[in-house]
Image (cartoon, rainbow, N blue to C red):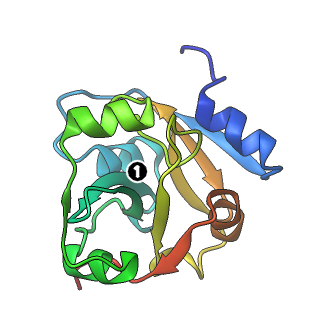
């Protein structure tokens, strides 16, 4: 596998986070990347989180971290962010802002750090898994450590 020294890994180290790196064979044809990662790693999908970039009606971008099998609740996100509306950001915009390729976008080490919202389902977990900054690399860490490193807000942002 390629180097593990991604900006996400470097950011986790710089933040003093305790974490583990997990690698798997990325399948570009997988329908749901996060669910594929969970299956490939033999993990419960409830602990594997995907990173999505959304755009508010103010044109500001925000980063969201939600369970791999969940859908982002745009109304809940807009409310949490103090906006009237939110939509998914164009993938090219998300890539440019984050510095990562879709399928490898991590909440950590983004080129332009964004306000980050982590779904509150992560809070009780002893460990959660997020993208490590490239396809096939994941970071396992404590939700509180991730939230602290990102100055993230933990709130309910998924469709029930």
Q: Image point 68% across, 70% down: which residue?
A: 144
State left or right for residue 8 relative to residue 33.
Answer: right
Residue 6, image x, y percentages: 60, 26
Q: Residues within 10 Å of mark 1 (few under 14, many from 20)?
A: many
Q: Image point 52% across, 39% down: which residue?
A: 110
Q: Picture quarter containing residue 92?
A: top left
Q: Which quadrant, please, contains the N terminus?
A: top right
State left or right for residue 43 relative to residue 151.
Answer: left
Residue 143, image x, y percentages: 63, 67
State left or right for residue 45 relative to residue 107.
Answer: left
Q: Can residue 13 be spotted in the picture?
A: yes
Disc 1 is placed on an element classified as helix
Residue 59 sits above or below residue 28 on the image: below
Q: Picture quarter containing residue 62?
A: bottom left
Q: Picture quarter containing residue 21?
A: top right
Residue 70, image x, y percentages: 27, 68
Q: Can residue 47 be spotted in the picture?
A: no
Q: Image point 53% across, 47% down: which residue?
A: 113
Residue 89 sits above or below residue 102 on the image: below
Q: Residue furthest front?
A: 58
Q: Image point 40% across, 41% down: which residue?
A: 40
Residue 140 sits above or below residue 147 on the image: above
Q: Which quadrant, please, contains the C terminus?
A: bottom left
Residue 56, image x, y percentages: 25, 64
Residue ID for mark 1: 38
Q: Residue furthest right?
A: 16
């Amino acid at each position: 596998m390629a180097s593990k020294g991604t900006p996400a890994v470097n950011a986790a180290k710089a933040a003093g986070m305790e974490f583990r790196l997990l690698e798997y064979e990325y399948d570009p044809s997988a329908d749901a990347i996060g669910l594929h990662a969970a299956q490939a790693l033999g993990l419960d999908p409830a602990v594997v989180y995907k990173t999505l970039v959304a755009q508010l009606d103010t044109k500001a971008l925000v980063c969201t971290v939600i369970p791999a099998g969940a859908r982002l609740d745009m109304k809940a996100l807009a409310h949490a962010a103090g906006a009237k509306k939110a939509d998914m950001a164009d993938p090219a915009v998300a890539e440019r802002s984050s510095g990562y390729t879709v399928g490898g976008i991590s909440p950590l080490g983004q080129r332009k750090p964004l306000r980050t919202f982590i779904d509150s389902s992560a809070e009780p977990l002893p460990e959660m898994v997020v993208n490590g900054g490239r396809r096939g690399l994941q970071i396992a860490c404590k939700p509180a450590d991730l939230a602290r490193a990102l100055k993230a807000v933990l709130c309910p942002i998924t469709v029930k």
